[in-house]
Image (tube, rainbow, N blue to C red):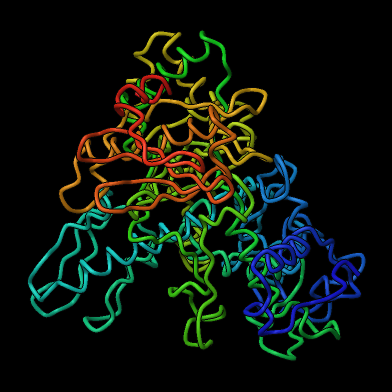
Amino acid sequence: MSVTRHLQDGEEYTLPIRQLIKQGEVLFNAKWTRQEGAGRPQTKGTGAVLSDNLDPLVFPRGMNRISGPDSNSCAGCHNTPFPGGGGDFVANVFVLGQRFDFATFDANDNIPTRGTIDESGFPTTLQSIANSRNTLGMFGSGYIEMLARQITARLQALRNGLAAGQSVKLLAYGIDFGQLARKADGSWDASAVEGLPPPSTSSTGSANPPSLLILPFHQAGAVVSLSMFTNNALNHHHGIQSTERFGLNADPDQDGIPNEATRADVTALTVFQATLPPPGRVIPRNSDIENAVRLGEDKFVAIGCASCHIPALPLVNNNQAYSEPNPFNPDGNLKPSDISQPLTVDLHDQQLPSPRLTAIKGVTWVPAFTDFKLHDITSGPNDPNREPLNMQFKPGSPAFRAGNNQFITRKLWGIANEPPYFHHGMFTTIREAVESHAGEASASMAAYHALSTSEQDAIIEFLKTLQVIQGTPYLIVDEIGTPRTWRNFPYSFSQHLKGNATDQEVNFNLSITCLLNWAETAYPNLFLPVGANFQNFQDYTYRFYQNTNSYVGVSSLDNHVYYIGQNAGFQDVGALSTWLQKANCN
């Protein structure tokens, strides 16, 4: 057996977080066996019963690359550059293939969704039975889920303030989701809402408004939480039925093994993924490359790429506290009402796998390069980047069979060392992916093609710095893993904060972060452990380093840097501007 001990429900609340994460890692890397419930003899990957229960999914029909089960382990697909990451093209998932019992393309099979014929009676081919999608990395996914929850809460607050006959602009943290209106009779009009999937904009009457949910997982925006993603994947890919999804002591696939994954197991798996470290940057210490990266950053913003691939979004009010379960989970997944209190994990905890992000004045900037919106970046009906099926609609419906051209803005953090590229994983280089943008990205692409060759190359050099980093507490390193500093990204971040935050204030906070990160590398004997969280007292923003019993911070009154050490009193060590120049943080 690959898992020698399953957690019992309730243990997830008593185990130390690091031990819970370790159990999640064991489950993520487990190669499930028939002895512990792998496979689903009488059910599809959707959880429904087989179309033909007289032909169960047992050897030699127990595994199927298209309809599943298709993998022995989570890490069998999510493994680049290490477990939790993306996957090679060979690890692509055939999304929606799981609605078939066992894909065969047998022309003599006339039973719908058994092996060949779809819900409408049409025969399928390898190109039309499912959407081939590349496996995405899960690094930083806890931050992604918390951002999605935060944006959803803001959209719903705007919605809840609408009276009959009114409309409101759906602007959440600087992201424009269009306009929501209510008609005079109180019914909802979401026809002008932008970037949200159909389930998030649908309404069944005045008393049932559109949910406006951000669905950050799946490349077409279809899953609200890591726990839902996990419950889906366990059954679809491995044939493991969780009690959270299928019920305690149930045996829906009739393999004789109930309780194949406990609720606590799913929580451990979810927390493991949520605490995977966020990607960082690798910037070689080569002046030509450095100059190209700076130019690439500038041009990335100038030609409009950053309007969708927003360089960083803020988690505010200390929202880095990841909680399980997600309050927006649908039926079939754990909900807050199912438990007495949620499990919480501070994503900034320096005991978690490093590196970690940090908050300053209650704001954590998450550099994921996304806007969480769905966009059409295809050139039209004949664009080969379109998908044959639309997972947002009922299988067999005309809308389902019309295909999909809407994709959530790809998170660019970690892109450079998680190939291949694009939603289908058929591009082997970043340049191919960039130059295949069309549709809503047409203006940016026209600007890109108007650049000189060296400027286009510079954008690629910049994108190549966005990498998953392992074994270091530093978010920015050079080619041999040595920590280094880098300038603030040339972008107006204040537009993503509510209130009266100015670019000057935001850049001030980002500069302090850059400076103190540099200080940790320049004076390693003074500031340990690295990556301490920011604190505030009166006009000071500072970090306290427990191991060295030292403080370093900046006063907003005089813009000077101050230090307190073991053998030193309160010291003014000079102007912030001087130190920023020395640290290359300008």
Residue 480 relative to residue 279: left or right: right
Task: Note whether 62 is above or below 243 in the view shown.
Answer: above
What is the quadrant of residue 582 in the picture?
top left
Q: How many marks?
A: 0
Residue 574 higher or lower than 409, as above or below: above
The residue at 56%/67% (across/down) is 120
> Which residue appears farthest toward the bottom when viewing the image?
249
For the residue pair 256 and 122, the one nearer the viewer reads as 256
The x, y position of residue 19, in whole percent, is 71, 67
In this orientation, which residue lies closer to the viewer: 120 or 37? 37
Residue at 48% x, 82% y is 336
Please say whether residue 309 is visible from this viewpoint: no
| Left or right of 351 in this view: 450 | left
- Up the image or down, 241 lies above or below 562; here it is below
In the image shown, does 375 or 333 lie closer to the viewer?
333
Residue pictured at 46% horizontal, 43% vertical: 368
Position in image of residue 159 (x %, y %): 21, 69
Quarter of the picture containing the N terminus is: bottom right
Q: Position of residue 485 (x, y in %)?
A: 48, 27
Task: Identify which residue is drawn at 25% across, 81% down.
Answer: 205
Res. 170 image quadrant: bottom left
